[in-house]
Image (cartoon, rainbow, N blue to C red):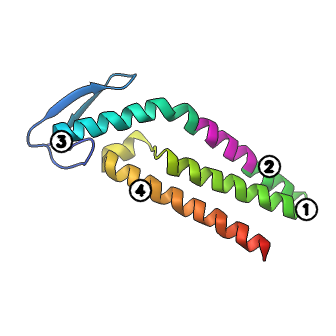
Amino acid sequence: MSSCMYCHKEIESSHAAVVGKEKIQITCCSDECVDKSEKFILYADRHKPHFISIMVAAIVIFFTGVILLSAAKIIVGSILFSIGFGLLGLDILLFPFATPQTFDSLGIKKTASLARIIGLVILGGSLLMALAMLM
């Protein structure tokens, strides 16, 4: 048996729909899960450019900090490193996207929750790094 795309429960009565810009065929266990899946996919379609832009900015800031750290610019490098790391965590928290394989394995609901937890951990780590720099 297949499992629901949203909640990942086994499907007893199939509810199918075609959603998103790419016209993805989804199968869910209920009309409610179809609606929630459709909302998430449309959210992902709308915000994918924002997610990628913030991710690129975070990586550039992060590696600029690393380069400055290696050039013995400790304070500025540490600050940029921490900001880049924090921006990465915030990006994942705001846009809990993952690989299609993860969505297939866990469902949208669990994958988004896991991504948000990872985003919070990364954001918390960046705040701890910032606090450590102040001490």
Q: Tell me the CA gap for discs 2 and 4.
A: 29 Å
Q: How many marks?
A: 4
Q: Residues within 10 Å of mark 1 (few under 14, many from 20)?
A: few
Expressed as whole percent of the image width and height from the top left, the position of residue 12 reads 8, 43
Q: Tell me the CA gap for discs 1 and 4.
A: 37 Å
Which residue lies at the image location 45% right of the left edge and 53% below the top edge? 115
Task: Tell me the quarter of the image containing the C terminus.
Answer: bottom right
Question: To which residue does mark 1 refer?
Answer: 72
Q: What secondary structure predominates along the stretch shown in magenta? A: helix
Query: Is 109 left or right of 134, judged from the image as shown?
Result: left
Question: To which residue does mark 3 refer?
Answer: 2
Q: Tell me the CA gap for discs 2 and 3.
A: 46 Å
First reached walking from the N terminus: tag 2 or tag 4: 2
Q: Tell me the CA gap for discs 2 and 1.
A: 13 Å
First reached walking from the N terminus: tag 4 or tag 3: 3
Residue 114: numbered disc: 4
Expressed as whole percent of the image width and height from the top left, the position of residue 90 reads 58, 52
- The answer to whether residue 53 is magenta is yes
Residues in magenta? 52-61
First reached walking from the N terminus: tag 1 or tag 4: 1
Residue 64: numbered disc: 2
Which residue lies at the image location 72% right of the left edge and 66% below the top edge? 130
First reached walking from the N terminus: tag 2 or tag 1: 2
Q: Residues within 10 Å of mark 4 (few under 14, many from 20)?
A: some
Question: Mark 3 and mark 2 in contact (Cβ < 8 Å)?
Answer: no
Query: Is 25 left or right of 48, judged from the image as shown?
Result: left
Name the residue type under label 1: Ala
Name the residue type under label 2: Thr
